[in-house]
Image (tube, grey):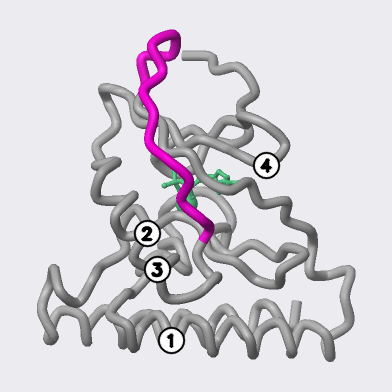
Amino acid sequence: MKYPRKLSSGANNTVIVLSDTEVAKLFTEDTRSDIGSEAKKMKYANAVNGLMVKFVRLEYNDDLAAEMLVMERLKPFDFRAYEVEIRTLWYSVFEDELTALHQAGFVHRDLKRPSNIGGAAFDNILLTEQGLRLIDAGISALREEVNQKIFDKYLEIEQNEMLLFKDYFLNR
Ligand SMILES: Nc1ncnc2c1ncn2[C@@H]1O[C@H](COP(=O)(O)OP(=O)(O)O)[C@@H](O)[C@H]1O
Ligand SMILES: [Mg+2]
């Protein structure tokens, strides 16, 4: 299906532009993921701090026959235009905020995409006017919904991916 105002097709979902300030992630009949669960995890992270993109509302679009997860529109720019000293500051805020999410029981789980899946390695981390932001809570996990042991496993992987991102972001 061809969508109007398409912004991007990620690994699973198409994202379209609604306005200058809002985008919508589309969930159609053949989407194998759950919009309610993704919205819940976003809202959970939004209540902790500003790192995760802000949830706005859920909508059903009859014309597109799609459930829409409406969110804040981010306008990313390229970190390579900025000197390493500035990137280091951005990274340090990112690390603090992600650590705060972890302590609050949220783990993102998709900082780095597996190398066998197409697309850029860190395309769920966007550099914006507000610094680094996270999108895509599709496979995120809440400690209260998994359990401590599973959560800790996810955390270990995420902490490793944070270091890989640091190296990429500061040295590329
Ligand atoms: N809030 C947003 N603002 C701007 N672009 C976004 C936003 N959310 C997603 N995108 C774009 O759409 C792509 C797919 O969204 P994402 O949530 O990562 O879906 P998927 O689960 O398919 O990876 C992203 O890589 C990004 O380019
Ligand atoms: Mg994604």
Q: Which mark is residue 45?
A: 3
Q: How crowded is mark 1: few (under 14 residues within 10 Å), some or many (20 or more)?
A: some
- In three-dimensional space, the C-alpha distance between marks 1 and 3, rounded to whole angstroms, equals 10 Å
Give the structural element (helix, strand or loop) at label 1: helix
| Marks 1 and 3 in Cβ contact (< 8 Å) | no
The amino acid type, in three-letter code, at marker 4 is Thr
Give the structural element (helix, strand or loop) at label 2: helix
Please give left or right for residue 146 compared with residue 18 in the image: left
Q: In which quarter of the image is the C terminus?
A: bottom right
Label 2 or label 1, whichever comes before in sequence order? 2
- In three-dimensional space, the C-alpha distance between marks 4 and 2, rounded to whole angstroms, equals 18 Å
Q: What is the x, y in percent for residue 39? A: 34, 50
What span is colored magenta in the figure?
Answer: 53-66
The amino acid type, in three-letter code, at marker 1 is Ala
- In three-dimensional space, the C-alpha distance between marks 2 and 1, rounded to whole angstroms, equals 15 Å
Q: What is the x, y in percent for residue 91? A: 66, 84
Residue occupied by mark 4: 21
Residue 60 in magenta? yes
Q: Quadrant of residue 152?
A: bottom left
Answer above or below: position of 85 versus 13.
below
For the residue pair 54 and 155, the one nearer the viewer reads as: 54
